[in-house]
Image: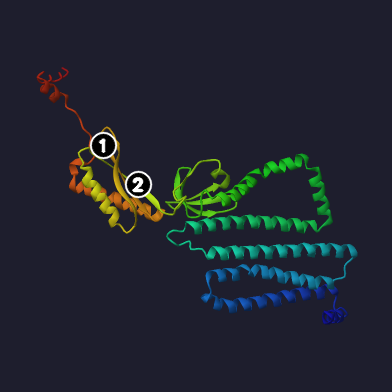
């Protein structure tokens, strides 16, 4: 530090202070950015063999490093410029606020890295991934909540380093009144969703990857944020649902207690269909499929309507995607079996001939209707 003061003291005799400060600021940023780029280029050649988590950590700290370089340049350059007492005090408060932002940024990066490390170790691609999805859902919601909390705390502490803002905050909290009520009402939707996010993480009525039916739309939970979730519908649309909606309206979760799911296939046929033979063929189709998990396979007559009877096939699969494909496969093959082997039992509409009915009673044939003259 003594060497730095000696060098800058000699330069002040040759150049104006602001020129020296600007030169030092630019030089430090140039050296820092150049060093970072060289390090990035060297590590990028090695990052091909890195794990995805390690690569994400490396990329996540780049902006943080540049911010630290700029802050270091300001700390070394500003003292070279002669300032008044009030200006020095203001600059001192600004440096404190910037340093608080740096600490908050570091804390947020560390928290996100630790949470991502934990999620990366979960077996989300396993067949029975219920516990993994449960933990991943909790960690992602806690990450959103921690990020919001760290941002609020960082901004609050940074602003509290200024006397004027601190006095304003104290007076605002002391007065409260109408302004506080208005602010609370304006922030009510956001606060409801944030509280619902914490409640979702604790109770977990749904998790990442769950097959759900929300607002009449069937799909999979693709993303859970601090205030809303994103459901990927089967036709690739995205349904965005506020978290507060989930606790105010009923919805269906097909994979609440297990990743496996029982699929249903409904087929309608005439009463002349031999149910036992069709049941044996339906079970055979299910057991022959690679999508079946070996748990449930059966057929029952679940309804008898005026013209047809309803056959319901139950077939279980390891997850919702396999269950959907299994249902389609069973439906196609079972309809083809009925069509090829029992075509007379396909659904049909019966019409009763009253003329034949009257002749059978001995009343004679019905008279032909007169044609108009």
Q: CA distance from mark 2 to mark 1?
A: 18 Å
| Disc 2, SS | strand
Query: Does residue 275 appear to the left or right of 159 in the view shown?
Result: left
Locate the N terminus by quadrant.
bottom right
Assess disc 1: are there few (<14), some (14-19) or many (≥20) residues with their C-alpha within 10 Å of its C-alpha: some
Residue at the spot of label 2:
264
Residue at the spot of label 1:
308
Q: Nearer the viewer, residue 165 or 112?
A: 112
Q: How is the image coloured?
A: rainbow
Query: Does residue 366 appear to the left or right of 180 in the view shown?
Result: left
Numbered mark located on residue 155 in the image: none
Residue occupying the point 74% across, 77% down:
27
10, above or below 335, in the image? below
Locate the C terminus by quadrant.
top left
Q: Nearer the viewer, residue 81 or 322?
A: 322
Mark nearer the N terminus (2 vs 1): 2
Quarter of the image holding residue 15?
A: bottom right
367, above or below 203, in the image? above
In percent of width and height, residue 150 lies at: 68, 58
Q: Nearer the viewer, residue 124 or 45?
A: 124
Residue occupying the point 83% across, 82% down:
3
| Disc 1, SS | loop
Q: Nearer the viewer, mark 2 or mark 1?
A: 2
Residue occupying the point 74% across, 69% down:
71
Query: Does residue 76 appear to the left or right of 276 in the view shown?
Result: right
Residue occupying the point 59% across, 69% down:
57
In percent of width and height, residue 48 lies at: 52, 75
Assess disc 2: are there few (<14), some (14-19) or many (≥20) residues with their C-alpha within 10 Å of its C-alpha: many
31, above or below 107, in the image? below
Quarter of the image holding residue 348?
A: top left
In percent of width and height, residue 355 lies at: 14, 24
């Amino acid at each position: 530090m003594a060497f730095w003061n000696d060098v800058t003291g000699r330069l002040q005799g040759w150049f104006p202070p602001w020129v020296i400060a600007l030169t030092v600021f630019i030089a430090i940023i140039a050296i820092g950015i150049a060093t970072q780029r060289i390090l990035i280029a060297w590590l990028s050649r090695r990052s091909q063999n890195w794990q995805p988590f390690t690569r994400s950590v490396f990329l996540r700290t780049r902006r943080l490093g540049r911010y630290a370089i700029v802050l270091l340049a300001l700390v070394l350059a500003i003292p070279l410029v002669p300032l008044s007492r009030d200006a020095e005090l203001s600059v001192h408060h600004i440096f404190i606020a910037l340093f608080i932002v740096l600490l908050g940024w570091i804390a947020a990066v560390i928290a996100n890295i630790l949470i991502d490390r934990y999620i990366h170790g979960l077996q989300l691609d396993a067949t029975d991934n219920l516990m993994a999805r449960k933990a991943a859902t909790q960690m992602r919601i806690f990450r959103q909540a921690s990020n919001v909390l760290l941002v609020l705390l960082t901004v609050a502490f940074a602003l509290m380093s200024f006397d004027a803002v601190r006095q304003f905050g104290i007076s605002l909290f002391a007065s409260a009144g109408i302004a506080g009520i208005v602010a609370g009402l304006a922030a009510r939707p956001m606060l409801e969703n944030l509280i619902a996010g914490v409640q979702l993480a604790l109770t977990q009525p749904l998790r990442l990857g769950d097959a759900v039916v929300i607002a009449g739309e069937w799909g999979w939970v693709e993303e859970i944020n601090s205030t809303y979730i994103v459901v990927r519908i089967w036709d690739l649309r995205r349904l965005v649902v506020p978290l507060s909606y989930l606790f105010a309206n009923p919805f269906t979760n097909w994979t609440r207690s297990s990743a496996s799911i029982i699929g249903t296939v409904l087929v309608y046929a005439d009463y002349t269909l031999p149910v036992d033979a069709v049941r044996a063929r339906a079970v055979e189709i299910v057991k022959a499929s690679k999508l079946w998990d070996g748990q449930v396979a059966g057929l029952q007559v679940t309804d008898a309507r005026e013209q047809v009877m309803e056959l319901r096939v139950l077939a279980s699969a390891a997850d919702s995607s396999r269950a959907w494909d299994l249902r389609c496969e069973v439906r196609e093959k079972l309809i083809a079996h009925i069509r090829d082997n029992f075509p007379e039992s396909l659904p049909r509409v019966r019409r009763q001939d009253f003329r034949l009915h009257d002749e059978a009673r001995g009343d004679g044939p019905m008279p032909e209707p007169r044609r108009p003259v």
